[in-house]
Image: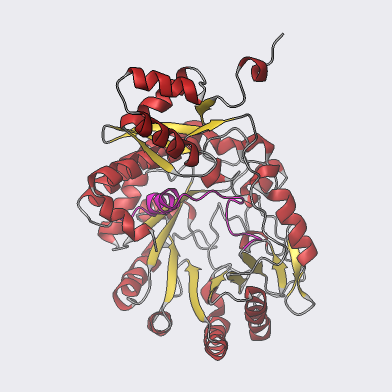
Amino acid sequence: MSTIAEVIPSSAFRPAEAHAFKAAGEDFLYLVPSGAVFRMEGLCKDIVEFVRREPAMRSDIVAHFIDKGLELAEIEATIDDLDQAAVIASGFSKPPAPVVPLQKFPLQRVVLNVTNQCNLACTYCYEYSADKIAQQDGKPKYMTADIAESAVEMLILEAGGREGLHVTFFGGETLLNFNVMRTTVIYAERRAAELGKRIEFSLTTNATLLNETIVDFLSEHRIGVTVSIDGDQELNDKMRVFHDGRGSYSVIAPKIKELLKRHRTNSIGARVTLTSQVADVQRIYQHLTTELGFDSVGFSPATASPDRLYHIGTQKMDNILDSFAKLAWEYRDYAVEGKQHGFTNVSDTLKELNSGVSKAYPCGAGVGLLGVGTAGDISLCHRFVDSPVGKMGHVKEGGVDHEARGEFLATHHIGARYDCHTCWARPTCAGGCFHEAFVHYGETSAANLHYCDWIRGWNDLCLQILGEISVRNPQFLERFEN
């Protein structure tokens, strides 16, 4: 029996690995694994279609299109362009392995879990629900200023030559430890100024503790804010409740409006957690933007084991994708008119697709980002703080454990996630969230197979949106280049 290599010469051209899609009446290719988007037209399109029917030698391609009346120089140049852009390929070599960062890859961001306490009892919370992985026994409830400042020094040390640094404050409910957050911001600003570096801040909050003093401080120090809220009163109060069962919406709605009114120096966005009971994406988006006044809203499904009542099943995830699609096409309409739309799930994905990102890792966890718990323990990210999984040192006892960090990077890149090797969406997904994988499969290195079809559907949708914008208002995409 002849092998494929014997039947097809290794030097024959064939289409490279790609995902085809249409937008604005045009044909496009999303090139894998480079992450580039290629618009198909003219002779380029004809040559790709020719070698798609059957791999062909350069001489056969040239002969075919000379017979069509084209000039030799144009044909040769187009073949070279397609080959160089990896739209077509020859040989049977494997795609290049992902670039794995060095063990001392510079840090860019540290997430400080300044408290492990919360004044809400949200049913789906990954820190306190039945799916929690943190082990907080014996850990202090609140981070001290000493630990926080040591974490800042760790960030400065591990950042190396990076000029731009970022500190994110997290919880529990972050503002329960506002005093330490405040002193840490002032300390970090002073240290950055001394070293000629730029430092930015952000925090996530449930908004229950916001007041004029806090809001003015956030505005003065240009601190970005993410507010966790799940929609209008009926939807929000299904899950986001106080410990006595009272809903939180009536408390936070006026505080959010005051935040949006007084804080204008940095972005303020809403983050919605979708569950089996809270999944009306369009209703939520409209309320948060038109009623409360958020400029941006992002949605994320709750991380939960399949047996949890609030877990989103496959059918409902498909329905959510349909709802996402309606908002995404609305985003397209805004973009064509040069207007900004607040659906950040689209903005974030378009930014990656437009830049041709091809990830070795799904996010910055363990790469450019580390989390720090109340006691000073360093973790893979904020979701693994105080967990035996993903431990990477202590801010006052030797700092970052580079051996543990290096081992993690070596075993969790996309090249090691074998289930992902043939997936066309791997440049943006890279296997999915490590915490999600651990909750579902008990292994941080597992691919999130339960989301694969959804991710491919979402990426295909966003590629269509990108293609539409690139044809109808390409100037809009310039905002993604910075």
The location of residue 32, given as percent across then percent down, is: 52, 39
Q: Is residue 157 left or right of residue 479?
A: right
Q: Is residue 16 left or right of residue 448?
A: left
Q: Is residue 306 visible?
A: no
The location of residue 4, given as percent across then percent down, is: 65, 17
Report the quarter where the C terminus lies: bottom left
Q: Is residue 363 left or right of residue 299?
A: right
Q: Is residue 18 above or below residue 133?
A: above
Q: Residue at x 64, y 66 (%)?
A: 370
Q: Residue at x 67, y 43 (%)?
A: 415
Given residues 213 and 90, the one toward you in this image is: 90
Q: Is residue 155 above or below residue 355?
A: below
Q: Residue 174 in magenta?
A: no
Given residues 10 and 170, the one toward you in this image is: 10
Q: Is residue 61 visible?
A: yes
**Location of residue 306 by image quarter:** top right
Q: Residue at x 55, y 60 (%)?
A: 121
Q: Is residue 54 left or right of residue 362?
A: left
The location of residue 148, given as percent across then percent down, is: 64, 80
| Residue at the farthest left position | 337
> What is the count of numbered marks?
0
Q: Residue 347 in magenta?
A: yes
For the record, the magenta segment spans 341-367
The location of residue 366, given as percent across then percent down, is: 66, 61
